[in-house]
Amino acid sequence: MNTRLGKKSLRLGVNIDHVATIRNARGGDHPDPVRAAELVASVGADGITAHLREDRRHIRDDDMRRLKEELDLPLNFEMAATAEMLKLCTEVQPHACCIVPENRTERTTEGGLDVAGQHNFIAPFVRELIDAGIRVSLFVDPERRQIKAAKSTGASVIEIHTGAYYEATAATDPARIKTELEKIQTIAAFADELGLEVHAGHGLTFHNVQPVAVIPQIVELNIGHFLVGEAIFMGLAEAVKEMKRLMQDARSGGHY
Ligand code: PXP
């Protein structure tokens, strides 16, 4: 472990996109993602993440404005690198912006951003956000070349895409789980050495969160789909409390 790390605390950012997915299934206002954000804030969430997609399939422009205006928690504005999103994000002025790749036909964010391959396009985009006073996070696969490229854009944060780890845990394949976890561990340490703040997310659940939560360089996990799904069975507040308990247990050296 990097000795300058000490023991960093681990934040939970709750992604409330799928509260909006349920609302939009019927139109109207219910369930309100801002109300969900207030609820999770009251039980220990450390931040709110929302992804404004080009097709507005869940979160809408006005949700973003209300999340910024009505909540005390930091807002992480997830978006694709487009001119339209740049304009909205600079208008909303969130705590942070997480840039993700976006594909209209995907069901969810399937892979990390190819910062290395699209550096000439992404670096000036990141610069515009930084100049507007917004901290920038880049959602990348656990690969060294992506981390190096992310660093050179001036972004201060990377979020490691944990989707491949999730797939391995869903397949209950111990060899794949080990391989994917090692990639995340190695990349978290590498990014931290470069001075980047390290976040992680995608596909994290009660069952697979702890081996990621224990990685000392990671300071934030962003979790959505599982929490909103589990809310059907145990309620959103209880689901968030249980997720935080598991994260903190892992971080403080408990067994898992
Ligand atoms: N982080 C980022 C950048 C994402 O795109 C997503 C999915 O929208 C998440 C975290 C949360 O993933 P999940 O909904 O699978 O928990």
Image (cartoon, rainbow, N blue to C red):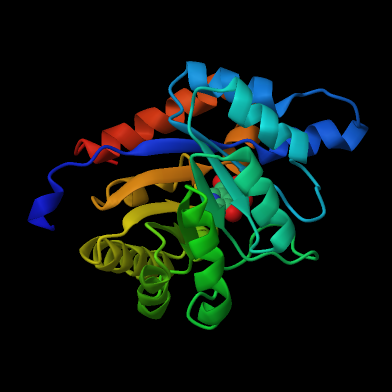
Residue 72, position in %: x, y? 50, 22
> Which of these two is toward me, 248 or 122?
122
**Residue at the spot 54% in from the left edge and 81% down from the top edge:** 120
Specify whether 248 is left or right of 27: left
Residue 47, position in %: x, y? 48, 33
> Which of these two is toward me, 163 or 95?
95
Which residue occupies the extreme left position in the image?
A: 3
Q: Quadrant of the N terminus?
A: bottom left
Please say if 120 is above or below 223: below
Please say if 127 is above or below 225: below
Is residue 43 in view?
yes
Q: Quadrant of residue 12?
A: top left
Which residue occupies the extreme bottom position in the image?
A: 117
**Residue at the spot 82% in from the left edge and 31% down from the top edge:** 23
> Which of these two is toward me, 77 or 250?
77
Please say if 249 is above or below 185: above
Which residue occupies the extreme front position in the image?
A: 131
Is residue 203 in view?
no
**Residue at the spot 68% in from the left edge and 57% down from the top edge:** 108
Number of labels in the image equals 0
Residue 251, position in %: x, y? 25, 39
Residue 184, position in %: x, y? 35, 64
Q: Quadrant of residue 77?
A: top right
Specify whether 37 is left or right of 54: left
Q: Quadrant of the C terminus?
A: top left
> Which of these two is toward me, 115 or 32?
115
Please say if 119 is above or below 14: below
